[in-house]
Image (cartoon, helix red, strand yellow):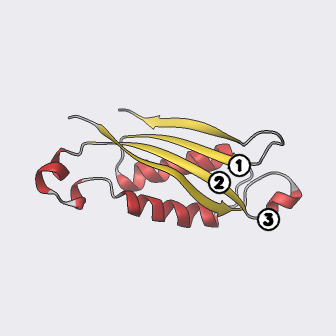
Amino acid sequence: MRLDTIFITDLQIETIIGVYDWERHTPQTVAIDLEMAADIGAAVRTDDIRHTVDYKAVAKRLIAYVGESRFELVETLVERVAGIVRDEFGVPWVRVRLRKPGAVRGARDVGIVIERGRR
């Protein structure tokens, strides 16, 4: 089986995230980059979206989930995002980069990158 990479870049979602009191009441934007391993062979042969990862469905699911979440740590949120992608969309490997713009004065953004599963 060959695995190719389907990606989503800079998916921006407003959510409550952070440990400080003001962060628990003020929505902030997080940005998510995803790389998802997929065998696209059947999709190529059939030209049918049912045989690939529907990146629009992935994005809609993450927008809904992250938008409703209320985590304190980006570490927790990024782990949950990876789990949703792998479990709900049958992705064997995912790389998630979650950025929190403006979290540290003087830095454009901070964040975390994780990889889960096997390629």
Quadrant of the rendering where the C terminus is positioned? top left
Point out residue 64 in the picture as x, y percentages from the top left corner: 54, 67
Residue plotted at (19% across, 52% down): 43
Q: Which SS class for mark 1?
A: strand
Taking the image as shown, residue 89 lies to the left or right of residue 95, namely left
Q: Nearer the viewer, mark 1 or mark 3?
A: 1
Q: Which residue is mark 2?
A: 30
Q: Residue furthest left?
A: 45
- Name the one closer to the observer, 114 or 45: 45
Looking at marks 2 and 1 on the same chain, the residue that comes earlier in the sequence is marked by 2
Taking the image as shown, residue 56 lies to the left or right of residue 73, namely left
Residue plotted at (12% across, 56% down): 46
Assess whether mark 1 and mark 2 are in contact (beta carbons under 8 angstroms).
Answer: yes
Label 2 environment density (alpha carbons within 10 Å; few <14, some 14–19, many ≥20): many
The residue under label 3 is which amino acid type? Thr
Point out residue 86 in the picture as x, y percentages from the top left corner: 42, 48
Per the model, the C-alpha gap separating discs 2 and 3 is 13 Å
Q: Which residue is mark 1?
A: 101
The residue under label 1 is which amino acid type? Pro
Point out residue 28 in the picture as x, y percentages from the top left corner: 72, 59
Label 3 environment density (alpha carbons within 10 Å; few <14, some 14–19, many ≥20): few
Q: Which residue is mark 3?
A: 26
Assess whether mark 3 and mark 2 are in contact (beta carbons under 8 angstroms).
Answer: no
The residue under label 2 is which amino acid type? Val
- Name the one closer to the observer, 96 or 118: 96
Q: Nearer the viewer, mark 2 or mark 1?
A: 1
Q: Which SS class for mark 3?
A: loop
Per the model, the C-alpha gap separating discs 1 and 3 is 14 Å
Q: Is residue 70 above or below residue 103?
A: below
